[in-house]
Image: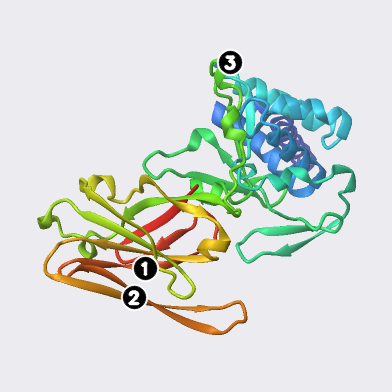
Amino acid sequence: MKNTILLFAFLVLTLIGCKKNEMLNNPKNSVTNVSDAYKGIAAVIVATAKEDNKFRTIAYQECGKQKYGDYYVKLNELISLNEQHKYWNKGTIDKLLDLQKLSKRDGNNDVIIFIPSIENHPEKALLNISNLVAEKKVPNGSGLVSTSNQSSGYRYQDPIAVIADEYENPTKTCPGYIVVMNGVLSFFQNIDEEFAWEHDVWVVGEEENCSPENMIAAVEDGLIESYSRFNGRAEYGGIIKVVNWSLVEPWVAGKPEFRSILNKGAGGGGTIHDKKYGKWRRIHFNGVFRNFGTFLFNWNLATIGDWTTEKWIEEDGGASSSISTTTTWKDSFGNTQTTTTSIPSKNKDDDLGQSIIQFTDQINQEYNLTGIIIKRSH
């Protein structure tokens, strides 16, 4: 009797073990919907990326090509590339093919892997695959692990998986998953747009089925904007945003009346621009930049110098007066100098402050004054 019971228990355990292995090896039996299929694919993708820098760099490079106008690669393309680079074995390929088939069973488009951070960090796609060698992992303080490649000097970050179907519109976030052990996804944190464009987030989802004209990157989108000045370049201003109306013009006073004054820097070189903009509806400046596209000058260093000051006033009138501003700066020898400028105004005008704008500043740099933010363009 004892032997019969043991034999029965053995058979039950064997059947359970077989069933478990069948579920693991045949995702058709464990995956019940498209979202589960995407998660199964994501688990394989990020687990491979975490352990194989060669695979990760191939994915970066494929996304960087923007073959379909955006920073993604199709799953079937990664499967095809495996023939050359051998980052997956046959069992993994079979699993991915089954999951891909399941994800498309309702007529869905191709499965893609989208890496948003390639847009802000294209250097990730520039590593030489043949030079990738052994690496060491070090904590980076964010709960993730960075991988430092000894050959390239580039520091990877543990990849985070996101399932596009799990995007929540009210919060504008998606759950983010990492692989902790045995290729199993574990919730890490909710991911928003700002985080995704700066960290190693891998989005698994469905390709958008657009018209052919919208499946390529726009030519203008590929142009690299230069934000550095060069001698003699035209300088434009009149770009202003209001961030605190109580410091600028209370609503009971109606439309604001802005004025900007520019002076040469060193030695109080005098006013080079003085512009009054007229009355404009508050909505034009309320938390958004209004660009008047005002030509200021051609920045010739020999005549303008290497910095200017820009002051803004909100005019309210009154008796004749003036606004004096003292600016402290260092000359080419490192000595501290002081420049005071006096601008004719009225005693009820609101002084919104002044900022030094240097020739070496990036052209899109923003300057915080009193209740407003200003910037330049070219």
Of residues 216 and 114, which is closer to you in this image? 216
Position of residue 231 measured from the top left corner of the image (x, y, whole percent): 60, 55
Determine which residue is flagged by label 3: 212
Sequence-wise first label, 1 or 2: 2
* Cα–Cα span, label 1 and label 3: 50 Å
Residue drawn at x 13%, y 52% as measured from the top left: 254
Amino acid bearing label 2: Thr
Is 319 displayed left or right of 118 in the figure?
left
Determine which residue is flagged by label 1: 354
Position of residue 376 measured from the top left corner of the image (x, y, whole percent): 45, 53
In the rendered image of this protein, does residue 58 appear above or below residue 314?
A: above
- Label 2: state its secondary structure: strand
Observer able to see residue 264: yes
Sequence-wise first label, 2 or 3: 3
Quadrant hosting residue 32: top right
Quadrant hosting residue 28: top right
Quadrant of the image containing the N terminus: top right
Q: How is the image coloured?
A: rainbow
Of residues 232 and 363, which is closer to you in this image? 232
Of residues 349 and 342, which is closer to you in this image? 342
Sequence-wise first label, 1 or 3: 3
Is 248 displayed left or right of 62 in the figure?
left
In the rendered image of this protein, does residue 233 appear above or below residue 95?
A: below
Amino acid bearing label 3: Pro
Is 257 displayed left or right of 311 in the figure?
left
What numbered label is drawn on residue 25? Answer: none
* Cα–Cα span, label 2 and label 3: 58 Å
Observer able to see residue 52: no
Of residues 143 and 72, which is closer to you in this image? 72
In the current view of this chain or complex, which residue is farthest to the bottom?
Answer: 335
